[in-house]
Amino acid sequence: MIKRHPEPLLWMLFSAGGVVSAMLMPALVFLFGVAFPLGWLTAPDREHMRGLLANPLVALVLLGLCVLSLFHWAHRFRHTLYDGLQIKHLEEVIATICYGGAVIGSAAAAYLLWQGL
Amino acid sequence: MSDSPTYTDYHPRWLRRRPSTYWWLEKPSYLAFVLREGSCLFVGWFVVYLLLMFRGVLQGDAAYQEFLAWSARPSVLALNIISFLFLVYHAITFFDAAPRALAVHVGKTRVPERVVGVSHYAAWLVASLLVFWLVLGS
């Protein structure tokens, strides 16, 4: 019997999350994390943001961004901890924390974005 | 990578020296590797930040204004400026690796790596402009 490994699936999620976050996050963090707080640009009012989140296509893209990015983080962080700190004996604990965190974050994202529709 | 590490209790002699925990400080290329891998922390942080913003927007005007005020606190702002730099680094390293990871074929001929790379950067530009247009309005 062939033993199925989750690694290829996790790598796919890592890779997809890497692409989606690379495409969208620099612009988003520039606006919401830097330009609006520093007053370089005026932050949109709540009505405009509420309208964006109510758009099913926008909500779907944001859900994909959140879920895939969380699994990107989980996978890369897990492997970096193994390689960098040589703590392979904590493998199961680390994997549980990383992927468990990604699942919880994904559920939170799905809940919030569903509420917004 | 094996599923579970196995440790040998009684070694006749160590054949390999255990690398220092700080091996990644020894060479610039090692440091670049660790910074690239470390960018994932900022990807994770920004998802949390987005979720906090969504919550503010959904809860009402007061909660949204509270989020905006919180985002302007020096500690949060500093973290986001660092996040921006890491996310740009993440994007560049990911798109530079894409042509080697993604072999695109049209018919039987493979699309040149340069084309795959350039199209990723073009898509990045379009996606960023779209974000600006949607958020800032017309």
Image (spheres, coloured by chain):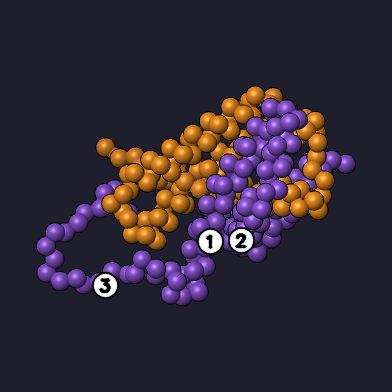
Chain colours: A orange, B purple
Q: Please give the name of the residue rendered at 45% of the width and 71% of the height, measured from the top-left corner.
A: B25
* Residue A12 shown left or right of residue A85 in the figure: right
> Between residues A105 and B121, which one lies in front from this camera angle?
A105
Q: Give the image location of residue B78, x and y in percent.
A: 64, 56
Q: Do tag 3 and tag 1 residues touch (Cβ < 8 Å)?
A: no
Residue B79 visible at all = yes
Instruction: Determine which residue is flagged by label 1.
Output: B36
Q: Earlier in the sequence, mark 3 or mark 1?
A: 3
* Residue B45 shown left or right of residue B136 in the figure: left
Instruction: Determine which residue is flagged by label 3.
Output: B17
Give the crowd class for mark 3: few <14, some 14-19, many >=20 residues within 10 Å.
few
Residue A55 visible at all = no
Query: Which residue type carries mark 3?
Result: Arg
Circle on res. A29: none
> Between residues B119 and A46, which one lies in front from this camera angle?
A46
Circle on res. B89: 2
Against B10, residue A113 (above or below) is above
Q: Please give the name of the residue rendered at 56% of the width and 44% of the height, measured from the top-left corner.
A: A69
> Between residues B63 and B17, which one lies in front from this camera angle?
B63
Q: Earlier in the sequence, mark 3 or mark 2?
A: 3
